[in-house]
């Protein structure tokens, strides 16, 4: 053999291999599984219509709409239109709006795209009953049979109003869930209801129980008709987690409340009851958390998610979440500070979406 | 082979090493090294006398009939899916090449071998993903890196061949820093200086083997491939003053990250090549792969930002990222069986061939193989999502051998081709936590690999 053979071989190989030394763009990341349970990213500019400024799907510095509850307009997840029910502080002539005042009405806005609410609120509920103490808020809406059930928080507990069309509501007398002095709630007034209809037609109500001290916990009740409720278990369905020495403190070690339950199925068809909720840690940092269980109708404990689903690292203080499950993604609506500036220090409704890489259809 | 050529080979090998700073593993382990081995599903531990011995068993190199130059190409089309949707896992394609140079030192038969796989769309692809991010851990990036190994083999006894050498990786340690004053409103007025200090340090791992001749029955082989991994470290410092409309804000940002990637477990392979029937070879390999030593590729990252905004300026500094609690991958050791059969059709007049007994002018080897690789990845019920499934590979191949075709080529000119189909049956993952952000999924896939190798034997 002459050395030219080997030399030519190496030269040819070097020329061939030297043509490309930069790798392809990132691969292997297409169509990855995602439960669309979170974390949520805030909606961006261009993802909201109706002249809304992302991430705020609803923002009014006079009536402070907040505490969202979203209902599919026709019960078909394939169509985007929704109705949103919000607590507001009605304007009082001659008085400056007070964002800290208790909510005095519940209004409905429509959103054709499922997220950009219109600017024509319809008042659907105002406080009339003595037990309501002049306030109604924190709505939760579900379809039960052919009706829309609107649950709300008032001074004396959790009330219910029913409607055939979602516009005109008729109250059910008295609170459907009032204080329970005998049990673990120690007479605290339940508030901030979240209701879900299970596959068997029964309903579950999750609610916030204040105390002890500045803390709050989440209780659970069940009902076959949505009117008569029975508390589940002899303790909270979800409570602040204890700090384990030597580990990172959990995001919900001080306060959990404002539950928003939703029923979903895993990719393998397993039913899952997710309960989104507001949470705070011992440093006062507020986030939206998630806890869930596989047995929606059972009484097994809710398992917290590994990390918050919204608001981590933000000072906007998200609270009172609700979610809307759509094919391929989930929308989150939550009350939080309208903006970072001093003039935006009032509650508004922000929107987010999971998975974070989803492309929403144009508003 | 001339003395001059023989003396040049080590120099060429050294030059190759210097010119290839990022030599890594290992497409050969996934798709085969060379078309002959690919057609036999890699069952060649006791039957690799060409450049593929540099991966499968360097001991066989000493049985090469003469100086051999090989050049080939392999293309693997990966169709890996989760929940029925393709995940766009990178196809793998590149050049495979090698040289085997046998000779004698003081009547002791020896051989020098060098082999490489060079991906033709980049020499490496390294990514650092969060441990929760689903990824085809064993197929997405690991096969798309360069492989290089250099070996020596000897035959101290007529029935014993021993070989060994090194394969190479390159690790990266880097640091960069930026200092100075940045003007936010007039960026071009900024006065910044930077420094970069990066080291590419070589990592070597051994490949060694032995072959024992079992009389007329064939060969028994054993090979060992060492464990290796890439250790990538990066440290960044940003220190200076940010001028924001005349307000100077001292700022310091530090970032440190360390990632392990391209982990290759150590493995031992025992091979048998049954050659008692003329023109027929039946090979069986059984490998043990030490997957339990697999280390998590999750990056360890720490970052810290310090700033001193003027009093009264409400600037909200981001929190330091929380340290990641890395979940051990807990992969499991696996035995991998491989089968390969080769039958050679021969035509034409008998010719004298350099380095081997007289043979027909034209030979057509027909090959088939099967391998089963049980997934080493445990059920991903927790937060990690190392997606994987068992792998069945069926391979077919054929060759065309022209013995002593030219006066200058008194050995043979050989063209080998192969195609291999790997089927990854569906594997269902059900999460233990109902609040898992990824949720349940099912994974499956197919891989189709094919290639050709041209070998000139002098």
Image (spheres, grey):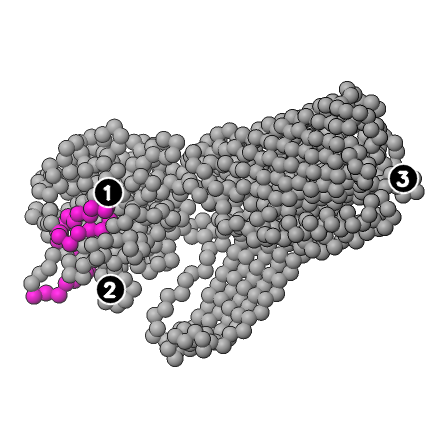
| Classed neighbour count for the residue bearing mark 1: other residues with Cα under 10 Å, few (<14), some (14–19), many (≥20) | some
Residue A257 in view (yes/no): no
> Residue at point 59% right, 52% down?
A20
Whether tag 2 and tag 3 are in contact, CB under 8 A, the answer is: no
User: Residue B200: image x %, image y %?
Assistant: 65, 58
User: Residue B61: image x %, image y %?
Assistant: 78, 38
Mark 2 against mark 3, which lies toward the viewer?
Answer: 3
Where is B255 relative to B307, above or below?
above
Q: Is residue B319 inside the magenta stretch?
A: no
- Where disc 3 sits, the SS reads strand
> Residue at point 52% right, 43% down?
B90
**Which chain is indicated by disc 2?**
A
Q: Which mark is residue B108?
A: 3
Q: Which mark is residue B254?
A: none
Write down the residue under mark 1. A80
Specify start and end residues of the magenta stretch as a single range: A94-121
**Which chain is indicated by disc 3?**
B
**Which chain is indicated by disc 1?**
A
Marks 2/1: CA distance?
A: 30 Å
User: Residue B427: image x %, image y %?
Assistant: 48, 31
Q: Are marks 2 and 3 on the same chain?
A: no
Write down the residue under mark 2. A344
- Where disc 2 sits, the SS reads helix
Closer-to-camera residue (B123/B25): B123
- Where disc 1 sits, the SS reads loop
> Residue at point 87% right, 38% down?
B109
Marks 2/3: CA distance?
A: 87 Å
């Amino acid at each position: 053999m002459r050395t030219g053979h080997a030399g030519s071989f190496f030269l040819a190989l070097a020329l061939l291999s030297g043509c490309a030394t930069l790798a392809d763009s990132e691969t292997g990341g297409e169509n990855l599984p995602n439960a669309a349970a979170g974390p949520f990213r805030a909606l961006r500019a261009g993802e909201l219509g109706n002249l809304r400024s992302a991430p705020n799907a609803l923002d009014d510095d006079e009536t402070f709409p907040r505490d969202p509850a979203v209902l599919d307009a026709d019960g078909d997840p394939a169509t985007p239109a929704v109705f949103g029910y919000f607590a507001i502080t009605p304007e009082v002539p001659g008085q400056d709006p007070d964002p800290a005042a208790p909510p005095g009405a519940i209004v409905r806005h429509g959103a054709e795209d499922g997220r950009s609410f219109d600017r024509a609120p319809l008042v659907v509920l105002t406080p009339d009953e003595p037990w309501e103490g002049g306030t109604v808020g924190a709505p939760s809406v579900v379809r039960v049979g052919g009706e829309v059930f609107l649950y709300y928080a008032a001074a004396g507990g959790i009330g219910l109003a029913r409607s055939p069309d979602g516009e005109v509501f008729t109250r059910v007398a008295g609170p459907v869930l009032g204080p329970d002095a005998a049990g673990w709630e120690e007479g605290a007034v339940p508030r901030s209801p979240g209701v879900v209809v299970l596959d068997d037609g029964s309903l579950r109500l999750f609610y916030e129980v204040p105390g002890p001290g500045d803390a709050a916990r989440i209780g659970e009740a069940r009902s076959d008709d949505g009117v008569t409720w029975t508390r589940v278990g002899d303790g909270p369905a979800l409570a602040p987690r204890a700090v384990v020495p030597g580990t990172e403190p959990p995001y919900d070690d001080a306060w959990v409340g404002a539950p928003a339950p939703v029923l979903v199925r895993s990719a393998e068809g397993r039913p899952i009851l997710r309960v989104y909720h507001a949470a705070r840690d011992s440093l006062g940092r507020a986030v939206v958390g998630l806890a869930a269980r596989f047995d929606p109708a059972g009484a097994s404990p809710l398992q917290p998610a590994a990390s918050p689903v919204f608001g981590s690292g933000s000072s906007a203080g998200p609270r009172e979440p609700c979610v809307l499950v759509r094919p391929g993604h989930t929308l989150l609506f939550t009350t939080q500070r309208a903006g970072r500036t001093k003039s935006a220090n009032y509650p508004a409704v922000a929107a987010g979406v999971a998975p974070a890489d989803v492309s929403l259809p144009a508003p | 082979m001339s003395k001059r050529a023989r003396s040049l080979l080590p120099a060429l090998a050294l030059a190759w090493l210097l010119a290839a700073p990022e030599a890594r593993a290992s497409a050969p382990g996934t798709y085969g090294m060379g078309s002959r081995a690919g057609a036999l599903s890699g069952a060649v531990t006791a039957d690799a006398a060409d450049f593929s011995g540099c991966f499968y068993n360097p001991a066989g190199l000493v049985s090469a009939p003469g100086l051999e130059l090989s050049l080939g190409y392999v293309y693997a089309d990966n169709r890996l899916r989760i929940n029925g949707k393709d995940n766009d896992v990178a196809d793998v394609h590149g050049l495979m090449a090698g040289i085997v140079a046998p000779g004698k030192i003081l009547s002791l038969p020896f051989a020098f071998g060098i082999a490489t796989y060079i991906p033709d769309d980049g020499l490496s692809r390294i990514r650092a993903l969060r441990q929760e991010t689903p990824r085809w851990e064993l197929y997405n990036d690991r096969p798309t890196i360069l492989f290089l190994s250099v070996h020596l083999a000897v035959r101290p006894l007529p029935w014993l061949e021993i070989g060994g050498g090194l394969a190479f990786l390159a690790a990266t340690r880097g640091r960069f820093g930026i200092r100075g004053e940045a003007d936010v409103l007039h960026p071009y007025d900024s006065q910044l200086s930077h420094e970069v200090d990066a080291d590419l340090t070589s990592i070597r791992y051994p490949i060694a083997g032995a072959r024992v001749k079992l009389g007329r029955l064939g060969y028994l082989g054993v090979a060992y491939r060492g464990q290796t991994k890439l250790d990538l470290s990066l440290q960044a410092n940003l220190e200076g003053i940010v001028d924001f409309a005349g307000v100077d804000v001292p700022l310091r940002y530090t970032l440190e990250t360390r990632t392990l990637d391209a982990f290759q477990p150590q493995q031992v392979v025992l091979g048998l090549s049954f050659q008692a029937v003329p023109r027929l070879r039946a090979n069986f390999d059984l490998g043990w792969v030490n997957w339990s030593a697999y280390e998590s590729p999750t990056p360890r990252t720490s970052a810290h930002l310090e700033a001193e905004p003027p009093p009264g300026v409400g600037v909200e500094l981001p929190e330091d990222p929380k340290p990641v609690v890395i979940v051990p991958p807990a992969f499991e050791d696996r035995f991998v069986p491989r089968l390969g059969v080769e039958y050679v059709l021969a035509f034409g007049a008998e010719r004298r061939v350099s380095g081997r007994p007289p043979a027909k002018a034209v030979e057509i080897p027909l090959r088939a193989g099967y391998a089963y690789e049980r997934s080493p990845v445990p059920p991903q019920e927790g937060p990690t999502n190392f997606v994987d499934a068992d792998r069945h590979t069926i391979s077919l191949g054929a060759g065309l051998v022209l013995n002593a075709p030219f006066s200058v080529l008194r050995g043979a000119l050989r063209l080998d081709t192969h195609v291999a189909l790997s089927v990854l049956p569906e594997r269902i993952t059900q999460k233990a936590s109902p609040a898992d952000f990824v949720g349940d999924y099912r994974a499956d896939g197919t891989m189709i690999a094919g290639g050709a190798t041209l070998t000139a034997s002098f």
